[in-house]
Image: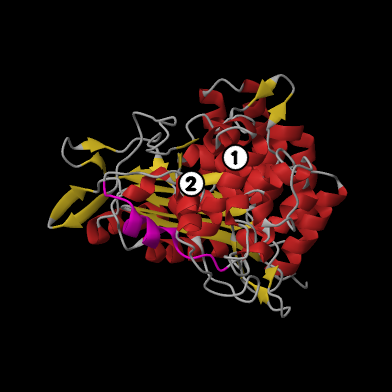
Amino acid sequence: MIYLSINIFLYFLYMFIVSLNLSTFDVEVRTADETLTEKERHQVTQIFFEDKVKELNGILEESYRKYHFNGHVMVVHHGKIIYNNFIGYADFATMDTLVDGSVYQLASVSKQFTAMAIMILKERKLLNYDHMMIDYLPELGGDQFPYYNTISIRHLLNHTAGLPNYMYFVEKYKNRDEHPYNDEVVKLLADHKMGLNFRPGSRFSYSNTGYMVLALIAERVSGIPFAEFVEQNIFQPLDMQDSFVYSRSRGTRDSKLRLVGFKKYRRFYPIQETRHDGVVGDKGVYSTAADLFKWDRALYTESLVSSETLEEAFTPGKLTNGREIPYGFGFRLKGMGGNERVVYHNGLWNGFRTTFTRYVDDNSAVLIMDHTDCRAKHIIAEKIEKILLAQQLNLTQVLAEKAMDEGPEKAIQIFYTMSRMNQNLVISLEELKKTYLFLDEINKKQMASHIDKLMEAISLQVHS
Protein backbone atom coordinates (compact mmCIF):
# COMPACT_ATOMS: atom_id res chain seq x y z
CA MET A 1 0.00 0.00 0.00
CA ILE A 2 1.34 3.44 -0.95
CA TYR A 3 0.35 6.28 1.40
CA LEU A 4 0.06 9.87 0.26
CA SER A 5 2.27 12.46 1.93
CA ILE A 6 0.32 14.88 4.09
CA ASN A 7 0.88 17.82 1.69
CA ILE A 8 -0.32 15.88 -1.36
CA PHE A 9 -3.20 14.50 0.65
CA LEU A 10 -4.28 17.94 1.80
CA TYR A 11 -4.09 19.18 -1.77
CA PHE A 12 -6.40 16.42 -2.98
CA LEU A 13 -8.68 17.07 -0.02
CA TYR A 14 -8.89 20.72 -0.93
CA MET A 15 -9.63 19.94 -4.59
CA PHE A 16 -12.30 17.44 -3.53
CA ILE A 17 -14.05 20.00 -1.33
CA VAL A 18 -13.88 22.60 -4.10
CA SER A 19 -15.34 20.13 -6.59
CA LEU A 20 -18.34 19.72 -4.30
CA ASN A 21 -18.55 23.50 -3.84
CA LEU A 22 -18.21 22.99 -0.09
CA SER A 23 -16.42 25.95 1.45
CA THR A 24 -15.11 25.11 4.89
CA PHE A 25 -14.66 28.71 5.91
CA ASP A 26 -18.04 30.30 5.28
CA VAL A 27 -18.80 33.50 7.13
CA GLU A 28 -22.04 32.04 8.47
CA VAL A 29 -22.69 28.55 9.78
CA ARG A 30 -26.33 27.63 9.28
CA THR A 31 -28.37 24.44 9.23
CA ALA A 32 -32.12 24.61 8.59
CA ASP A 33 -33.50 27.08 11.14
CA GLU A 34 -30.39 27.09 13.34
CA THR A 35 -27.72 29.77 13.10
CA LEU A 36 -24.56 30.29 15.10
CA THR A 37 -23.70 33.81 16.16
CA GLU A 38 -20.23 35.07 15.36
CA LYS A 39 -19.16 34.54 18.97
CA GLU A 40 -20.54 30.96 19.01
CA ARG A 41 -18.84 30.23 15.70
CA HIS A 42 -15.47 31.28 17.12
CA GLN A 43 -16.12 29.23 20.26
CA VAL A 44 -16.61 26.15 18.09
CA THR A 45 -13.40 26.91 16.19
CA GLN A 46 -11.40 27.17 19.40
CA ILE A 47 -12.34 23.60 20.33
CA PHE A 48 -10.05 22.44 17.54
CA PHE A 49 -7.17 24.69 18.60
CA GLU A 50 -6.97 24.00 22.33
CA ASP A 51 -3.27 23.09 22.18
CA LYS A 52 -2.48 26.27 20.24
CA VAL A 53 -4.55 28.36 22.66
CA LYS A 54 -2.43 27.00 25.52
CA GLU A 55 0.74 27.99 23.68
CA LEU A 56 -0.61 31.46 22.94
CA ASN A 57 -1.70 31.92 26.56
CA GLY A 58 1.84 31.03 27.56
CA ILE A 59 3.26 33.70 25.24
CA LEU A 60 0.86 36.32 26.60
CA GLU A 61 1.57 35.52 30.25
CA GLU A 62 5.34 35.37 29.72
CA SER A 63 5.23 38.74 27.91
CA TYR A 64 3.35 40.25 30.84
CA ARG A 65 5.89 38.91 33.38
CA LYS A 66 9.09 39.55 31.45
CA TYR A 67 8.30 42.61 29.35
CA HIS A 68 5.37 44.24 31.20
CA PHE A 69 3.10 43.80 28.20
CA ASN A 70 -0.34 45.27 28.92
CA GLY A 71 -2.63 44.78 25.99
CA HIS A 72 -4.67 42.64 23.63
CA VAL A 73 -3.72 39.79 21.29
CA MET A 74 -5.99 38.36 18.61
CA VAL A 75 -5.11 35.54 16.19
CA VAL A 76 -7.26 34.73 13.16
CA HIS A 77 -6.75 31.43 11.33
CA HIS A 78 -8.51 30.75 8.03
CA GLY A 79 -10.99 33.51 8.69
CA LYS A 80 -11.91 32.56 12.24
CA ILE A 81 -10.70 33.78 15.59
CA ILE A 82 -8.71 31.05 17.33
CA TYR A 83 -7.33 33.33 20.04
CA ASN A 84 -8.67 36.52 21.60
CA ASN A 85 -7.25 37.55 24.97
CA PHE A 86 -5.85 40.48 26.93
CA ILE A 87 -3.81 41.01 30.07
CA GLY A 88 -2.84 43.86 32.37
CA TYR A 89 -4.17 47.20 33.54
CA ALA A 90 -6.06 49.97 31.81
CA ASP A 91 -5.09 52.50 34.49
CA PHE A 92 -2.15 51.96 36.83
CA ALA A 93 -3.32 54.59 39.31
CA THR A 94 -6.77 53.07 39.89
CA MET A 95 -5.62 49.50 39.07
CA ASP A 96 -8.58 49.11 36.71
CA THR A 97 -7.91 46.13 34.45
CA LEU A 98 -8.21 46.04 30.69
CA VAL A 99 -11.49 44.77 29.25
CA ASP A 100 -12.40 43.16 25.94
CA GLY A 101 -13.76 46.49 24.72
CA SER A 102 -10.77 48.65 25.69
CA VAL A 103 -10.13 51.23 22.95
CA TYR A 104 -6.53 51.61 21.74
CA GLN A 105 -4.81 54.32 19.73
CA LEU A 106 -3.73 52.56 16.52
CA ALA A 107 -0.91 55.03 15.84
CA SER A 108 0.40 54.45 12.29
CA VAL A 109 -1.99 51.54 11.70
CA SER A 110 -4.40 54.47 11.23
CA LYS A 111 -2.82 55.10 7.82
CA GLN A 112 -4.73 52.24 6.19
CA PHE A 113 -8.01 53.97 7.06
CA THR A 114 -6.74 57.23 5.58
CA ALA A 115 -5.75 55.35 2.43
CA MET A 116 -9.21 53.73 2.30
CA ALA A 117 -10.84 57.17 2.51
CA ILE A 118 -8.84 58.22 -0.55
CA MET A 119 -9.72 54.98 -2.38
CA ILE A 120 -13.42 55.54 -1.69
CA LEU A 121 -13.21 59.06 -3.11
CA LYS A 122 -11.33 57.74 -6.14
CA GLU A 123 -14.06 55.17 -6.82
CA ARG A 124 -16.63 57.96 -6.64
CA LYS A 125 -14.58 59.79 -9.29
CA LEU A 126 -14.02 62.73 -6.96
CA LEU A 127 -10.24 62.51 -7.31
CA ASN A 128 -7.54 60.58 -9.13
CA TYR A 129 -4.32 59.09 -7.75
CA ASP A 130 -2.33 60.96 -10.39
CA HIS A 131 -3.91 64.33 -9.61
CA MET A 132 -1.47 66.80 -8.10
CA MET A 133 -1.49 67.61 -4.39
CA ILE A 134 -1.78 71.35 -5.14
CA ASP A 135 -5.07 70.72 -6.95
CA TYR A 136 -6.52 70.34 -3.44
CA LEU A 137 -3.98 72.36 -1.44
CA PRO A 138 -3.41 75.42 -3.65
CA GLU A 139 -1.69 77.24 -0.78
CA LEU A 140 1.30 74.96 -1.43
CA GLY A 141 1.53 75.93 -5.12
CA GLY A 142 3.70 78.56 -6.75
CA ASP A 143 7.27 79.00 -7.88
CA GLN A 144 8.54 79.48 -4.31
CA PHE A 145 8.02 75.75 -3.69
CA PRO A 146 10.34 73.84 -6.05
CA TYR A 147 8.85 70.48 -7.08
CA TYR A 148 5.73 70.83 -4.86
CA ASN A 149 3.74 71.14 -8.10
CA THR A 150 4.83 67.61 -9.09
CA ILE A 151 3.64 65.79 -5.94
CA SER A 152 0.74 63.49 -6.78
CA ILE A 153 -1.74 61.77 -4.49
CA ARG A 154 -0.04 58.50 -5.43
CA HIS A 155 3.27 59.90 -4.15
CA LEU A 156 1.60 60.69 -0.83
CA LEU A 157 0.06 57.22 -0.57
CA ASN A 158 3.36 55.48 -1.39
CA HIS A 159 5.60 57.70 0.82
CA THR A 160 7.56 58.97 -2.18
CA ALA A 161 6.59 62.67 -2.01
CA GLY A 162 9.63 63.95 -0.10
CA LEU A 163 7.67 66.24 2.24
CA PRO A 164 9.46 67.36 5.44
CA ASN A 165 8.45 65.97 8.83
CA TYR A 166 5.61 68.15 10.12
CA MET A 167 6.42 67.33 13.75
CA TYR A 168 9.74 69.19 13.53
CA PHE A 169 8.28 72.49 12.38
CA VAL A 170 5.19 72.23 14.60
CA GLU A 171 7.56 71.99 17.57
CA LYS A 172 9.55 74.92 16.20
CA TYR A 173 6.64 77.28 15.54
CA LYS A 174 3.89 76.19 17.96
CA ASN A 175 3.72 76.40 21.74
CA ARG A 176 3.34 73.32 23.91
CA ASP A 177 -0.25 74.17 24.78
CA GLU A 178 -1.30 74.49 21.13
CA HIS A 179 -2.69 71.52 19.17
CA PRO A 180 -2.86 72.52 15.50
CA TYR A 181 -5.16 70.62 13.14
CA ASN A 182 -4.11 69.46 9.68
CA ASP A 183 -5.05 72.71 7.90
CA GLU A 184 -3.02 74.76 10.40
CA VAL A 185 -0.01 72.50 9.88
CA VAL A 186 -0.27 72.90 6.10
CA LYS A 187 -0.42 76.68 6.60
CA LEU A 188 2.81 76.46 8.60
CA LEU A 189 4.33 74.52 5.73
CA ALA A 190 3.30 77.24 3.31
CA ASP A 191 4.17 80.23 5.52
CA HIS A 192 7.70 79.04 6.25
CA LYS A 193 8.45 77.71 2.75
CA MET A 194 9.60 74.29 3.88
CA GLY A 195 11.67 72.60 1.19
CA LEU A 196 11.34 68.98 0.08
CA ASN A 197 13.75 66.26 1.18
CA PHE A 198 14.06 64.90 -2.38
CA ARG A 199 12.48 65.12 -5.82
CA PRO A 200 9.01 63.47 -5.70
CA GLY A 201 9.04 59.88 -6.89
CA SER A 202 12.81 59.47 -6.72
CA ARG A 203 12.98 57.84 -3.27
CA PHE A 204 10.91 56.02 -0.67
CA SER A 205 10.92 57.68 2.75
CA TYR A 206 8.24 56.90 5.33
CA SER A 207 6.27 60.11 5.89
CA ASN A 208 3.71 61.03 8.52
CA THR A 209 3.34 64.37 6.76
CA GLY A 210 2.08 62.69 3.59
CA TYR A 211 -0.80 60.99 5.40
CA MET A 212 -1.61 64.16 7.36
CA VAL A 213 -1.98 65.85 3.94
CA LEU A 214 -4.10 62.98 2.58
CA ALA A 215 -6.57 63.34 5.46
CA LEU A 216 -6.92 67.05 4.70
CA ILE A 217 -7.42 66.28 0.99
CA ALA A 218 -10.17 63.79 1.87
CA GLU A 219 -11.78 66.46 4.03
CA ARG A 220 -11.71 69.12 1.33
CA VAL A 221 -12.93 66.81 -1.43
CA SER A 222 -15.78 65.36 0.63
CA GLY A 223 -16.75 68.67 2.21
CA ILE A 224 -17.01 67.19 5.72
CA PRO A 225 -14.49 66.71 8.56
CA PHE A 226 -12.16 63.75 8.11
CA ALA A 227 -13.40 62.08 11.31
CA GLU A 228 -16.98 62.35 10.08
CA PHE A 229 -16.11 61.00 6.62
CA VAL A 230 -14.38 57.94 8.07
CA GLU A 231 -17.26 57.38 10.49
CA GLN A 232 -19.91 57.54 7.76
CA ASN A 233 -18.04 55.68 5.02
CA ILE A 234 -15.95 53.07 6.85
CA PHE A 235 -16.92 52.53 10.47
CA GLN A 236 -20.70 52.63 10.08
CA PRO A 237 -20.90 50.37 6.99
CA LEU A 238 -18.68 47.79 8.74
CA ASP A 239 -20.50 48.10 12.08
CA MET A 240 -17.28 49.19 13.79
CA GLN A 241 -19.26 50.77 16.60
CA ASP A 242 -16.34 51.39 18.98
CA SER A 243 -13.96 52.95 16.44
CA PHE A 244 -13.45 56.65 15.82
CA VAL A 245 -10.97 59.30 14.74
CA TYR A 246 -9.86 61.43 17.69
CA SER A 247 -8.33 64.90 17.45
CA ARG A 248 -7.65 66.91 20.57
CA SER A 249 -8.10 70.17 18.68
CA ARG A 250 -11.43 69.32 17.04
CA GLY A 251 -13.43 67.81 19.90
CA THR A 252 -14.12 64.66 17.91
CA ARG A 253 -15.82 61.57 19.28
CA ASP A 254 -14.41 59.99 22.45
CA SER A 255 -15.05 56.94 24.64
CA LYS A 256 -14.91 56.14 28.36
CA LEU A 257 -12.91 53.05 27.40
CA ARG A 258 -10.31 55.03 25.43
CA LEU A 259 -6.95 54.17 26.93
CA VAL A 260 -4.12 56.51 27.84
CA GLY A 261 -0.56 55.58 26.96
CA PHE A 262 1.90 54.79 29.77
CA LYS A 263 5.67 54.71 30.02
CA LYS A 264 7.54 52.61 32.56
CA TYR A 265 10.35 54.10 34.63
CA ARG A 266 10.41 52.01 37.84
CA ARG A 267 6.65 52.42 37.82
CA PHE A 268 4.16 53.35 35.08
CA TYR A 269 3.57 57.03 34.31
CA PRO A 270 0.76 58.31 32.04
CA ILE A 271 1.98 60.04 28.87
CA GLN A 272 0.36 63.41 28.31
CA GLU A 273 -1.02 64.36 24.91
CA THR A 274 1.37 66.49 22.88
CA ARG A 275 1.01 69.39 20.47
CA HIS A 276 0.87 66.77 17.69
CA ASP A 277 -2.36 65.17 18.93
CA GLY A 278 -4.50 67.64 17.00
CA VAL A 279 -3.35 66.13 13.68
CA VAL A 280 -5.10 63.08 12.20
CA GLY A 281 -4.53 60.83 9.20
CA ASP A 282 -1.06 59.63 10.06
CA LYS A 283 -2.48 58.51 13.43
CA GLY A 284 -5.57 59.31 15.49
CA VAL A 285 -7.75 56.27 14.83
CA TYR A 286 -8.89 54.49 18.01
CA SER A 287 -10.36 51.00 17.84
CA THR A 288 -10.91 47.66 19.56
CA ALA A 289 -9.78 44.16 18.68
CA ALA A 290 -13.35 43.18 17.78
CA ASP A 291 -13.70 46.10 15.37
CA LEU A 292 -10.34 45.40 13.73
CA PHE A 293 -11.50 41.84 13.09
CA LYS A 294 -14.44 43.31 11.18
CA TRP A 295 -12.00 45.52 9.26
CA ASP A 296 -9.84 42.50 8.41
CA ARG A 297 -12.87 40.57 7.13
CA ALA A 298 -14.04 43.53 5.03
CA LEU A 299 -10.68 43.65 3.23
CA TYR A 300 -11.56 40.28 1.64
CA THR A 301 -14.81 41.70 0.25
CA GLU A 302 -16.11 44.60 -1.80
CA SER A 303 -17.94 46.12 1.16
CA LEU A 304 -16.18 49.48 0.74
CA VAL A 305 -14.49 49.49 -2.67
CA SER A 306 -14.15 47.13 -5.62
CA SER A 307 -11.62 44.31 -5.58
CA GLU A 308 -9.66 46.07 -8.34
CA THR A 309 -9.32 49.23 -6.27
CA LEU A 310 -8.51 47.25 -3.13
CA GLU A 311 -5.80 45.29 -4.92
CA GLU A 312 -3.93 48.54 -5.58
CA ALA A 313 -3.53 48.98 -1.82
CA PHE A 314 -1.59 45.71 -1.72
CA THR A 315 0.54 46.42 -4.82
CA PRO A 316 4.11 47.75 -4.43
CA GLY A 317 4.60 51.36 -5.39
CA LYS A 318 7.19 52.32 -8.01
CA LEU A 319 9.87 54.98 -8.14
CA THR A 320 10.53 57.01 -11.27
CA ASN A 321 13.41 54.65 -12.12
CA GLY A 322 11.00 51.69 -12.11
CA ARG A 323 12.19 50.15 -8.85
CA GLU A 324 9.43 48.70 -6.68
CA ILE A 325 9.05 49.68 -3.03
CA PRO A 326 7.58 47.46 -0.26
CA TYR A 327 4.62 49.75 0.42
CA GLY A 328 1.17 49.99 -1.10
CA PHE A 329 -1.58 52.31 0.12
CA GLY A 330 -1.45 52.34 3.92
CA PHE A 331 0.13 48.87 4.10
CA ARG A 332 3.69 47.61 4.19
CA LEU A 333 4.25 44.56 2.00
CA LYS A 334 6.40 41.47 2.30
CA GLY A 335 6.55 37.92 0.99
CA MET A 336 6.89 34.76 3.05
CA GLY A 337 8.24 32.64 0.22
CA GLY A 338 6.35 31.15 -2.69
CA ASN A 339 3.19 33.08 -3.46
CA GLU A 340 2.27 33.91 0.13
CA ARG A 341 1.34 37.58 0.46
CA VAL A 342 1.69 39.41 3.76
CA VAL A 343 0.47 42.96 4.29
CA TYR A 344 1.08 44.65 7.60
CA HIS A 345 1.69 47.84 9.53
CA ASN A 346 3.15 48.76 12.89
CA GLY A 347 2.28 51.73 15.03
CA LEU A 348 4.11 53.64 17.77
CA TRP A 349 2.77 56.76 19.46
CA ASN A 350 2.65 58.13 23.01
CA GLY A 351 2.98 54.76 24.75
CA PHE A 352 0.84 52.82 22.27
CA ARG A 353 2.42 50.05 20.22
CA THR A 354 0.35 48.25 17.62
CA THR A 355 0.99 45.64 14.96
CA PHE A 356 -1.55 44.35 12.48
CA THR A 357 -0.36 41.60 10.13
CA ARG A 358 -2.56 39.97 7.48
CA TYR A 359 -1.52 36.69 5.81
CA VAL A 360 -3.73 37.38 2.82
CA ASP A 361 -3.55 34.08 0.95
CA ASP A 362 -3.95 32.10 4.16
CA ASN A 363 -6.95 34.21 5.27
CA SER A 364 -5.23 34.69 8.64
CA ALA A 365 -4.13 37.64 10.77
CA VAL A 366 -2.33 38.65 13.96
CA LEU A 367 -3.27 41.75 15.95
CA ILE A 368 -1.23 43.01 18.92
CA MET A 369 -2.14 46.21 20.81
CA ASP A 370 -0.37 47.58 23.89
CA HIS A 371 -0.59 50.91 25.70
CA THR A 372 2.52 50.77 27.91
CA ASP A 373 5.37 51.37 25.47
CA CYS A 374 6.31 47.69 25.78
CA ARG A 375 9.22 46.82 23.52
CA ALA A 376 8.32 43.14 23.16
CA LYS A 377 5.75 43.56 20.40
CA HIS A 378 7.99 42.11 17.69
CA ILE A 379 9.08 39.23 19.94
CA ILE A 380 5.44 38.36 20.59
CA ALA A 381 4.59 38.67 16.89
CA GLU A 382 7.43 36.37 15.83
CA LYS A 383 6.40 33.67 18.31
CA ILE A 384 2.78 33.84 17.23
CA GLU A 385 3.74 33.74 13.56
CA LYS A 386 5.65 30.50 14.06
CA ILE A 387 2.60 28.90 15.67
CA LEU A 388 0.23 30.25 13.04
CA LEU A 389 2.28 29.24 10.01
CA ALA A 390 2.92 25.77 11.43
CA GLN A 391 -0.81 25.09 11.82
CA GLN A 392 -2.14 22.72 9.17
CA LEU A 393 -5.69 22.12 8.07
CA ASN A 394 -7.60 20.43 10.91
CA LEU A 395 -9.50 17.58 9.27
CA THR A 396 -11.75 17.07 12.27
CA GLN A 397 -12.76 20.71 12.00
CA VAL A 398 -13.50 20.27 8.28
CA LEU A 399 -15.91 17.44 9.03
CA ALA A 400 -17.56 19.14 12.01
CA GLU A 401 -18.24 22.33 10.10
CA LYS A 402 -19.62 20.42 7.13
CA ALA A 403 -21.96 18.52 9.42
CA MET A 404 -23.18 21.72 11.04
CA ASP A 405 -23.43 23.63 7.78
CA GLU A 406 -24.79 21.10 5.31
CA GLY A 407 -25.82 18.08 7.32
CA PRO A 408 -24.16 14.81 8.35
CA GLU A 409 -24.47 13.13 4.92
CA LYS A 410 -22.07 15.63 3.29
CA ALA A 411 -19.60 15.34 6.15
CA ILE A 412 -19.72 11.54 6.11
CA GLN A 413 -19.22 11.56 2.33
CA ILE A 414 -16.07 13.64 2.76
CA PHE A 415 -14.86 11.36 5.55
CA TYR A 416 -15.28 8.19 3.46
CA THR A 417 -13.48 9.81 0.51
CA MET A 418 -10.62 10.97 2.73
CA SER A 419 -10.36 7.49 4.27
CA ARG A 420 -9.96 5.92 0.83
CA MET A 421 -7.26 8.48 0.00
CA ASN A 422 -5.31 7.97 3.21
CA GLN A 423 -5.76 5.01 5.52
CA ASN A 424 -3.62 6.76 8.16
CA LEU A 425 -6.26 9.45 8.53
CA VAL A 426 -6.55 10.80 12.08
CA ILE A 427 -9.87 12.23 13.23
CA SER A 428 -10.39 13.31 16.84
CA LEU A 429 -13.58 11.89 18.29
CA GLU A 430 -12.78 13.83 21.46
CA GLU A 431 -12.95 17.14 19.59
CA LEU A 432 -16.19 16.09 17.92
CA LYS A 433 -17.66 15.14 21.30
CA LYS A 434 -16.72 18.55 22.74
CA THR A 435 -18.38 20.18 19.73
CA TYR A 436 -21.50 18.10 20.29
CA LEU A 437 -21.65 19.03 23.98
CA PHE A 438 -21.14 22.73 23.24
CA LEU A 439 -23.91 22.77 20.62
CA ASP A 440 -26.22 20.89 22.94
CA GLU A 441 -25.44 23.32 25.75
CA ILE A 442 -26.37 26.37 23.64
CA ASN A 443 -29.54 24.59 22.47
CA LYS A 444 -28.48 23.99 18.86
CA LYS A 445 -30.13 20.57 18.94
CA GLN A 446 -30.19 19.93 15.20
CA MET A 447 -26.52 20.79 14.75
CA ALA A 448 -25.66 18.65 17.76
CA SER A 449 -27.60 15.78 16.21
CA HIS A 450 -25.61 16.11 13.00
CA ILE A 451 -22.33 15.93 14.91
CA ASP A 452 -23.64 12.87 16.77
CA LYS A 453 -24.42 11.08 13.47
CA LEU A 454 -20.98 11.98 12.15
CA MET A 455 -19.32 10.52 15.26
CA GLU A 456 -21.37 7.34 14.88
CA ALA A 457 -20.26 6.91 11.25
CA ILE A 458 -16.60 7.50 12.13
CA SER A 459 -16.76 5.06 15.05
CA LEU A 460 -18.27 2.37 12.85
CA GLN A 461 -15.53 2.89 10.24
CA VAL A 462 -12.78 2.80 12.86
CA HIS A 463 -14.04 -0.43 14.43
CA SER A 464 -14.97 -2.20 11.22
Read off the residue under disc 2.
182
Label 1 – label 2 distance at C-alpha: 10 Å
Q: Earlier in the sequence, mark 1 or mark 2?
A: 2
On the image, which quarter does residue 254 sit in? top left
Dot 1 alpha-carbon crowd within 10 angstroms: few under 14, some 14 to 19, many 20 or more: many
The answer to whether marks 1 and 2 mark residues whose Cβ atoms lie closer than 8 Å is: yes
Q: Is residue 367 visible?
A: no
Residue in view at x 64 percent, y 57 percent: 329
Q: Is residue 69 visible?
A: yes
On the image, which quarter does residue 453 sit in? top right
Please give left or right for residue 346 compared with residue 173 in the image: right
Read off the residue under disc 1.
219
Please tell me whether mark 1 sits on a helix, a strand or a loop: helix
Residue 268, position in %: x, y?
18, 50
Whether 52 is drawn above or below 217: the answer is below
Please tell me whether mark 2 sits on a helix, a strand or a loop: helix
Q: Which residues are magenta?
A: 162-176
**The N terminus is located in which quarter?**
bottom right
Residue 61, position in %: x, y?
30, 53
